[in-house]
Image (cartoon, helix red, strand yellow):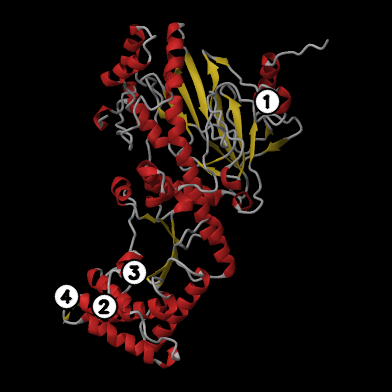
Amino acid sequence: MAAAAAGSGGANGSAHQVGAPTNPMATALLTDQYQFSMAYAYWKAGKHADRAVSTYYLLEFNTSNCRFDLYFRKNPFGGEFTVFAGLEECIKFVANFKFTEDDISFLQSVMPMCEDAFFDYLRKTDCSDVEVYSIPEGSVVFPKVPLMRVEGPVAVVQLLETPFVNLINYASLVTTNAARHRHVAGKSKVLLEFGLRRAQGPDGAISASKYCFMGGFDATSNVLAGNLFGIPLRGTHSHAYVSSYMSLDEIPDKSLKSKDGSRVCKDFVSLVTEWLQKIQLADSSCGVFGETNQSELAAFASYALAFPTNFLALVDTYDVMRSGIPNFCAVALALHDLGYKASGIRLDSGDLAYLSIEARKVFRTIEKEFNVPAFGKMIITASNDLNEETIDALNKQGHEVDAFGIGTYLVTCYSQAALGCVFKLVEINSRPRIKLSEDVAKCHDGFQVSIPCKKRCFRLYGKEGYPLVDIMMRESEPSPKAGERILCRHPFLESKRAYVVPQHVEELLLCYWPGTSNKPRVELPSLEEIRGRCMQQLEKLRPDHIRRLNPTPYKVSVSAKLYEFIHSLWLNEAPVGELQ
C-alpha cells in the first residue's frame, strides 16, 4: 500500500503522514485465520462494534499465544531487562490497514460459509476508530508492564493481534540481544552487525540490521538496510579475495597518486616490497619476520590501490603473525609514504585475545622504529562467530580488539529462539475482564492471571536518578507525584509491598495513534533518536539490574486500589469448588 494512503486515523490521525510498513507483506491479511473466524462470529452476534481495550506485554516463549492480554513472565537471555522495539512498524500497519478487493476475494474463497454482508463490512474496515497507546520505542521494559494499549471495536482490534505480536516479538528480542552485546563490549568498542547471510531470510536480515542498530550497534554490512534506514555501512573483503591472487604480477596498474595529488607513485607494488624488506631486516623484528605469502601480499597491495583511504585487511588467510601482519604493515607503510592512513586489520580465526595483543605489539614497534605517528593505534577488528559470552571471555583474558563483527549468534538470537507474545482482553464496553489459569491453585505467583481493566503506568525514580519501580494504576486514580509517598504492591503476593517516595515520575503509556479522538499524538522519532533513547535508558538502570551474572530483578507493582480490584474480580470470576 502506498505511503500516501497512510494517516487514515480520523481528523487527528490524518494530519500526520506515517508512511507504509517497511515490509510490503505487512498487509491486513497478515494474521491468523482464527482472527477472521472470531471477527465473523463477533459480527454475526452484533458484537463487532463493542469497544475493546487490549494490552500488549512481552512474554517468555510460550506456544499458547491465542489470548487477549500480553505480559512477559521472564526477561530474555537470562537477564533482567528487555528493550521494547517494533512500535513504528505497528503504527505504520495501523495507518495503512485496509482490505483490497483481491483480499476480499481470497477471504470469500477460504470462508465460503460467511455471509456476503460480512465481507461488505470488511471492505469498509480500517483503523480510524482505533487508539494506540505505547511505551516509547527503545525504552527498557519489564515483566507484567503493558507495552501497548489498543482501544477500538473488538473485531478490528482482534484483527490487529497477530500482526502486532509479530512486529513486536522479534524486534524486541533482537534489540535486547544487541543491547546486551553493547553492555558486555563496553561503550568504547565499535560493534558491527555482520548477520545478513545467516539471518532467517531477507525479512529477518533487514529487521536484524535495523534493531541491532537501535540496540547499540554502530554499523552493518547489510547494504539494503543502510539504504532503507540510513545505518552506516562497514565491510572489507573475504578470504576468497586474498586467495584469488597468485602473485604480484597479477596487478595490472601499479600507479597510485598521493593523497594530496601532488605526485604519482608509478610502482606502488615496488614501494610495498621495499617496506616489507625493511620490516624483515629491522633490528626490532629480531628475525621474527621471514618470507611471507606473496599472493597475500599481492591481494593486500591490490586492495590498497582500490581503496587507499580505507585500507583494512583480513590477515588470517595463511598465517597471521608470520605473513598477514608483516604483509599488512608493508602495504600500510607504503600508503603512509603517499599521505594515506591505513584503517587496520580484521582477525577471523585463531586465539583472538593472543593475536590481537601480538599484533598491537608489532604496530607499536613499527611506530617507534620508523617514526610513523599513530601506527600503534591501528584498528583491530575481530569476528568469527562471536557472541556475548565470547566477548566477556575476551575481556577477562585481556585483548587489544577495537571492534567486534558479530553475525550468527546476534541476528538469530541463538540462545533464545523466540520472545512470544500473548494478547488478553482487559476491558470491553467499560467492563473489566480477567483471565485465570485452568488450575487456579498454580496462580499464586500471578503468572497465569491477567491484570484487568484500563490502566495507566508510571516509572518512579529515586534520589540517585535510578528507576526504583514501575507501578500500574486504574485510570480513575490520581497520578503519583514527586515527593509524595505511595504504596506499591506486588500484583499477586500479599506480603510483598513497600512505600516509595519518588523524586521523579514518568508516565509510560503515551498516545501514538489517536483514531477519531482529539487527543494529542506523539510523533514517531527517527531511528537515531530511538537508538539514543535506548542507550540513555540503559545508563539510567542500576548496574546490578543489567549485569550478566545474577542480575537483580526490577520491581513491578500495582497501586493498592488496583491490587484490591484484581483480587476482588479474581474471586468473583473463579469457580467455587464443592466437596462431597
Left or right: 418 in relation to 557: left
Give the farthest residue toward the right.
580
Which of the two residues, 289 or 377, is positioned nearer the viewer here? 289
Determine the residue positioned at 34% across, 61% down.
235
| Residue 368: quadrant of the picture | bottom left
Q: N-terminal of the two: label 3 or label 4? A: 4
Q: Nearer the viewer, mark 3 or mark 1?
A: 3
Left or right: 431 in relation to 342: right
The span from disc 3 to disc 4 (Cα, nearest Å) is: 20 Å
The span from disc 2 to disc 1 (Cα, nearest Å) is: 76 Å
Q: Which residue is mark 2?
A: 247
Residue 312: mark: 3
Q: Position of residue 392 (x, y in %)?
A: 56, 61
Q: Is there CB contact under 8 Å for labels 3 and 2?
A: no
Q: Secondary structure at mark 3?
A: strand
Q: N-terminal of the two: label 3 or label 1? A: 3
Q: N-terminal of the two: label 3 or label 2? A: 2
Q: Nearer the viewer, mark 3 or mark 4?
A: 4
Q: N-terminal of the two: label 4 or label 1? A: 4
Q: Position of residue 74 (x, y in %)?
A: 61, 39
Q: Position of residue 340 (x, y in %)?
A: 27, 75
**Is residue 124 visible to us here?**
no
Whether residue 137 is situated above or below residue 236 in the rendered picture: above
**Is residue 524 visible to us here?**
yes
Determine the residue positioned at 40% across, 84% down.
366
Left or right: 291 in relation to 259: right
Q: Secondary structure at mark 1?
A: helix
Q: Is there CB contact under 8 Å for labels 3 and 4?
A: no
Whether residue 358 is situated above or below residue 541 in the rendered picture: below
Determine the residue positioned at 46% across, 62% down.
189
